[in-house]
């Protein structure tokens, strides 16, 4: 069905793999179209999936937007390309499902931006992160100038973006760009364990947690607490809230129904 990505669901977890290893999974227009289609048509409508693991086939996560394709792009095409990338990243960011980036190798440019659009990042010790765009005469254009400072702070984001400095996984962990670093052979197991742990929680609460955090990060604290109140109201309106608390009182595991 897809030529540049694969998507499958196993035990309620979605696995989205960027699969263009010959170009280190570089995001050309075709890849972006396929990711967008997968997000809109396979992942968003599937209520059985709470968490999605995003990874790359071969030795790279994603080595960036496709430089070969961008090389001859004119101003209008550059604008369209940027918009297409923004749509993919924003769809991930806004979708009330949890995306875990399992970063297996190079996460450069658009690849680092894809990882940052995900909710949680787990990196292999072999992963390399960076935003090398200024060396190509452009800037990060799939959200990097916005998400990187929000994740690691303005000064460190400027250091990385403006000097085009690539960093290894341990440094990415130290500065808060990734949440965990594991040996390469443990990467997928670690991501799956986390996905299962998230999927075992009350789904409405998980969704509302993501919505409240994301909405609050884009506004002031007091507006953020209003978002939190609305999100909490959705939880209190759910049957799963009654089930979760009843199960605690009855000293048994909860049986959440996503209702
Ligand atoms: N685009 C296209 N092809 C790529 C890319 C890329 N980003 N990265 C790697 N490839 C290709 C190489 O050209 C090579 O192809 P071929 O075998 O046909 O020569 C193949 O993948 C393997 O790559 P290398 O031989 O270079 O492998 P190395 O192990 O020697 O090096 C690196 C690996 C360090 C990852 C190196 O490939 C590299 O530096 N790649 C480019 C990284 C980069 O600059 N990424 C940022 C791109 S710009 C971007 O992402 C902007 C996002 C916003 C765009 C907004 C739109 C306007």
Image (cartoon, rainbow, N blue to C red):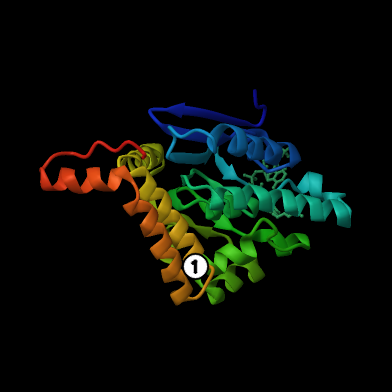
- Along the line of sight, which residue is nearer the eye, 106 or 237? 237
Vertical comparison of 108 with 59: above or below: below
Vertical comparison of 199 with 171: above or below: above
- Residue 164 percent coordinates (x, y): 64, 65
- Along the line of sight, which residue is nearer the eye, 76 or 164? 76
- Using residue 249 as the reference point, say whether residue 3 is left or right of it: right
- Using residue 23 as the reference point, say whether residue 232 is left or right of it: left
From this viewpoint, which residue is outermost toward the top? 1
Quarter placement of the C terminus? top left
- Along the line of sight, which residue is nearer the eye, 57 or 83? 83
**Residue at position x 65%, y 40% from top?**
36
**Residue at position x 37%, y 57% from top?**
233
- Using residue 27 as the reference point, say whether residue 155 is left or right of it: left
Based on the displayed image, in which of its 4 quarters is residue 12 positioned?
A: top left
* Residue designated by label 1: 217
- Residue 237 percent coordinates (x, y): 35, 50
- Residue 194 percent coordinates (x, y): 34, 44
- Is the residue indicated by label 1 positioned so its CB lies within 8 Å of ligand 1? no
Based on the displayed image, in which of its 4 quarters is residue 171 positioned?
A: bottom left
- Using residue 113 as the reference point, say whether residue 173 is left or right of it: left
Vertical comparison of 29 with 134: above or below: above
**Residue at position x 44%, y 55% from top?**
210
Secondary-structure class at tag 1: helix
Based on the displayed image, in which of its 4 quarters is residue 175 positioned?
A: bottom left
Q: Is residue 57 visible?
A: no
């Amino acid at each position: 069905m897809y030529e540049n990505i694969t998507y499958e669901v196993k035990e309620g977890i979605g696995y989205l793999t960027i699969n263009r290893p010959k170009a280190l999974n570089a995001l050309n227009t075709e890849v972006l179209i396929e990711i967008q289609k997968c997000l809109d048509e396979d992942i968003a409508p599937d209520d059985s999936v709470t968490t999605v693991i995003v990874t790359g086939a071969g030795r790279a996560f994603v080595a960036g937007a496709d430089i070969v394709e961008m090389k001859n792009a004119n101003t209008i095409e550059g604008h369209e390309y940027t918009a297409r990338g923004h749509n993919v990243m924003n769809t991930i960011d806004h979708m009330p499902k949890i995306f875990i980036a399992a970063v297996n190798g190079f996460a450069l440019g658009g690849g680092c931006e894809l990882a940052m659009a995900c909710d949680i990042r787990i990196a292999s010790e072999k992963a390399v992160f960076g935003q090398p765009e200024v060396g190509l005469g452009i800037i990060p254009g799939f959200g990097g100038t916005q998400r990187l400072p929000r994740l690691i702070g303005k000064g460190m984001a400027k250091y990385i973006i403006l000097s085009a400095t690539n960093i290894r996984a341990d440094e990415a962990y130290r500065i808060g760009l990734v949440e965990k670093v594991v040996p390469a052979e443990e990467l997928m197991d670690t991501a799956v364990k986390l996905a299962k742990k998230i999927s075992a929680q009350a789904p409405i609460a998980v969704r509302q947690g993501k919505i409240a955090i994301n909405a609050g990060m884009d506004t002031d604290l007091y507006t953020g607490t209003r978002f939190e109140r609305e999100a909490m109201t959705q939880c209190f309106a759910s049957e799963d809230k009654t089930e979760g608390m009843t199960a605690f009182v009855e000293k048994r595991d909860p049986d959440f129904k996503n209702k």
